Image (spheres, rainbow, N blue to C red):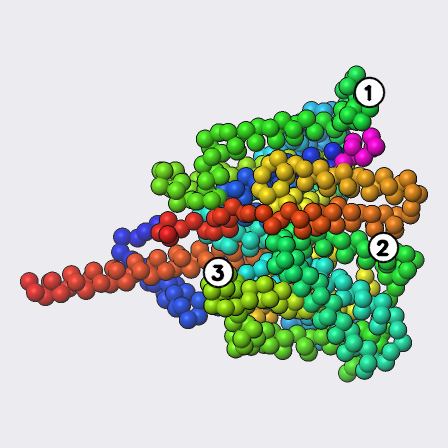
């Protein structure tokens, strides 16, 4: 950026700084600015392929049920698309919240996939293959999700606390270990000969009501979504208003200071990982027993890794995460429709997601530039004022 | 036994070179979770260059093409790593965030470019470049020595390259002036700055080295395990390398041991499954061996583990 001689002369720049410079709203305006920048970059990319970016973005919204499509198949309309988008969104919100909680305590939970898989598998084989009625099965699935995830999470926390094993390493190792062990059990006991996945769970135990006839439409209703939004507010409450949350944050900011203040650091590390794991477990059950109804052996869901980025895009803020999850899900869900309307490869949507994340990662830099520019404008104003006063005196 | 050593080395050495890349970056104070993306992008660059030059017909020109692939993988990894360096150093982004983002971007970008490339070049939008397996050689005489000889039997061409690169890298890191400064950057960047050396520049170079070495490692995996470039290259080698280097306490020597452990435990597991005549389902159980072993060893050894002091911190001149 070139420095103009007189910072006050460019009204465009001044307006820009005035909007972005308000510290009260920066948590919101700067990510938004980054997203706009990245959409511009994505537009350039689409233009270079000879495609109309506006049609592309509209198709993304249409494909995810936020705008009506030109035509629909029988028993489908905008609501069915929207519901199936929510179906994908639900585990994403839980997983990103899981990353956020750990991050607040200064821990980097890269093992979300493993913490999703374990409760997903346990719930599938215990409840999923049973004949329980929905009223009994669904709460049980959720409880298994929370407990299973929390168990894996606290194991990682405990390894860190007791043996000083870096949580990144232990969670990567555990990811592989669980993935292989579960793949073994699926392949030996629960395999479906045709799909090469675990057998489908019974419809009663699924957290998504699949292919339900409602208002003359056939749609999927994700029950987990009812919990996902309150979960975000609950995490916010936990972090901002409770002692547990406060201690976690202090440990995350400065371990030594926390210790000095009499906070049990080890307990809090385990606690943070347990909460994070529990949320990841909820993501796991809404993913494997909701969004899908079986488990593919030897595959760790990429959702576990994407959720890290989604969390960071939402500034690790629970409410921000609701929006960032929505954005990323809309792009990935809508990509199918986009590739059919403008005939581009589906990988484009991942690329757009990548660009958004890339520009959002520069948020701190944008903030830095804005505050520099703000100082510059302030200095300039001060100088002009002084000059005027001197002029008056003369 | 021979099988274990041959296959173990073939897996351990590419992992090792990626881990060395990670060590360069992390010892200079830049957390590098992007190794996974670097190795994938490097492999893509090498494979794409081979496809562009040979036109898809590799018969008869395997060796020159192999060298081309190596060179381009090195360059590709280096160029791509500049993105991470750019985000982390001048743009002051959180280094963990940047790493994750780079990985996601690498997966998306290479998948997209591969299908574009294949469409333009061969008219079919597949996401795969078929490369075949790198040639092997056997050193005469020495290879006949029992046990030890296995280290010289069926050696992939890339193995001596990696060993040479590793030797040069450890010389640079531990014996050269540049290496001393680099290591100082990770522990006390203010001291480096006070000595009149640009911390940003040094870290930038360190990240680029890590990109180049990771790219090389990724290319080796593409030329051995998968025999092609496809999105399966992103199956966690980079993360495994990170685990190895943390296990190795950010030092090159112990990291080699960690990589060998991964390699031998992996090939040993396969061999065991083969000998016992187990089905592929049981092989899964044996495949957890390297990871369980690592966790157990870490329980004993990681109490003394110490990361570079300024690792992950954005360098701020004014800070004390």
Q: How far is mark 3 from mark 1, CA to CA? A: 58 Å
Mark in the foreground, 3 or 1: 3
Dot 2: element: helix
Q: Is mark 1 on a helix, strand or loop?
A: helix
- For the point 64% across and 47% down, the residue is B301
Residue under the image location 44 percent in, 55 percent down: A365
Can you give x and y, in whole percent of width and height, for residue A141 in the image?
78, 73
* SS of the residue under disc 3: helix
Same chain for labels 3 and 1? Say yes or no. no
Residue furthest to the left in view is A394
Same chain under badges 3 and 2? The reply is yes
**Residue under numbered circle 2:** A184
On screen, residue A251 versus residue A289, left or right, reads left
Asked whether A68 or B147 is in front, the reply is B147
Q: Mark 1 points at which residue?
A: B144
Q: How crowded is mark 1: few (under 14 residues within 10 Å), some or many (20 or more)?
A: some
Q: Nearer the viewer, residue A367 or B8?
A: B8
Residue A256 numbered tag = 3
CA distance for labels 2 and 1: 39 Å
What percent of the width, then of the height, locates residue B285?
83, 51
Do we see residue B236 in this rendering? no
Furthest-top residue in this view: B141
Q: Is residue B98 visible?
A: yes
Q: Which of marks 3 and 2 is nearer the N terminus?
A: 2
Stretch of the chain drawn in magenta: B1-8
**Residue, x 65% and y 43% (percent of image)?**
B244
Of the two numbered discs 2 and 1 in the rendering, the one whose residue sits closer to the viewer: 1
Give me the chain letter of mark 2. A
């Amino acid at each position: 950026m070139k420095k103009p001689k007189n910072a006050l002369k460019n009204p465009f720049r001044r307006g820009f700084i005035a909007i972005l410079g308000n510290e009260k709203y920066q948590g919101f305006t700067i990510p938004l600015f980054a997203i706009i920048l990245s959409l511009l970059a994505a537009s350039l990319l689409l233009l270079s392929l000879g495609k109309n970016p506006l049609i592309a973005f509209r198709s993304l919204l249409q494909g995810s049920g936020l705008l009506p499509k030109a035509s629909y198949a029988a028993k489908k309309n905008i609501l069915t698309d929207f519901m199936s988008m929510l179906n994908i969104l639900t585990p994403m919100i839980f997983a990103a919240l899981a990353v956020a909680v750990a991050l607040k305590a200064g821990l980097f939970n890269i093992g979300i996939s493993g913490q999703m898989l374990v409760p997903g598998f346990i719930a599938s084989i215990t409840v999923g293959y049973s004949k329980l009625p929905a009223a009994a099965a669904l709460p049980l699935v959720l409880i298994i999700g929370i407990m299973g995830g929390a168990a894996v999470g606290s194991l990682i926390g405990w390894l860190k606390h007791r043996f000083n094993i870096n949580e990144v390493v232990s969670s990567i190792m555990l990811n592989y270990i669980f993935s292989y062990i579960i793949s073994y059990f699926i392949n030996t006991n629960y395999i479906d000969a045709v799909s090469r996945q675990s057998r489908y769970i019974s419809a009663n135990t699924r957290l998504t009501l699949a292919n339900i006839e409602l208002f003359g439409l056939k749609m999927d209703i994700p029950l987990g979504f009812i919990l996902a939004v309150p979960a975000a507010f609950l995490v916010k409450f936990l972090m901002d208003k409770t002692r547990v949350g406060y201690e976690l944050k202090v440990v995350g900011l400065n371990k030594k200071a926390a210790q000095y203040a009499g906070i049990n650091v080890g307990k809090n590390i385990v606690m943070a990982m347990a909460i994070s794991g529990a949320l990841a477990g909820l993501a796991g059950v809404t993913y494997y027993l909701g969004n899908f109804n079986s488990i593919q052996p030897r595959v760790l869901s990429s959702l576990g890794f994407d959720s890290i980025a989604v969390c960071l895009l939402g500034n690790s803020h629970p409410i921000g995460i609701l929006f960032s999850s929505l954005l990323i899900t809309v792009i990935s869900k809508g990509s199918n429709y986009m590739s059919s309307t403008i005939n581009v490869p589906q990988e484009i949507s991942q690329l757009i997601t990548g660009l958004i994340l890339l520009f959002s990662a520069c948020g701190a830099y944008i903030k830095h530039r804005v505050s520099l520019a703000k100082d510059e404008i302030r200095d300039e104003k001060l100088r002009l004022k002084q000059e005027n006063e001197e002029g008056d005196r003369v | 036994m021979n099988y274990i050593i041959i296959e173990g080395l073939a897996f351990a050495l590419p992992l090792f070179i990626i881990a060395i890349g990670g060590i360069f970056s992390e010892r200079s104070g830049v957390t590098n979770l992007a190794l996974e993306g670097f190795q994938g992008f490097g492999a893509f660059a090498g494979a794409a260059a081979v496809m562009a030059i040979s036109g898809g017909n590799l018969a008869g020109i395997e060796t020159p093409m192999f060298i081309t692939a190596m060179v381009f993988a090195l360059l590709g990894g280096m160029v791509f790593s500049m993105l991470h360096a750019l985000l982390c150093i001048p743009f002051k982004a959180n280094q963990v965030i940047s790493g994750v983002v780079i990985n996601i971007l690498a997966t998306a970008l290479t998948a997209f470019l591969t299908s574009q490339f294949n469409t333009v070049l061969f008219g079919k939008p597949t996401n795969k470049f078929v490369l075949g397996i790198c040639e092997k050689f056997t050193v005469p005489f020495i290879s006949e020595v029992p046990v030890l000889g296995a280290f010289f039997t069926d050696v992939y061409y890339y193995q001596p390259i990696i060993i040479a690169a590793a030797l040069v890298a450890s010389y640079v890191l531990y014996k050269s002036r540049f290496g001393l400064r680099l290591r100082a950057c990770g522990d006390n960047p203010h001291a480096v700055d006070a000595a009149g050396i640009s911390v940003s520049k040094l870290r930038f170079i360190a990240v680029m080295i890590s990109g180049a070495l990771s790219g090389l490692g990724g290319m080796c995996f593409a030329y051995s395990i998968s025999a092609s470039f496809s999105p399966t290259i992103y199956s966690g080698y980079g993360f495994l390398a990170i685990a190895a280097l943390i296990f190795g306490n950010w030092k090159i020597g112990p990291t080699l041991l960690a990589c060998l452990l991964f390699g031998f435990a992996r090939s040993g597991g396969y061999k065991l499954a083969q000998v016992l005549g187990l089905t592929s389902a049981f092989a899964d159980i044996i495949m957890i061996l390297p990871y369980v072993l690592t966790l157990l060893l870490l329980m004993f050894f990681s109490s003394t583990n110490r990361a570079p002091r300024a690792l992950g911190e954005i360098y701020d001149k004014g800070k004390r």
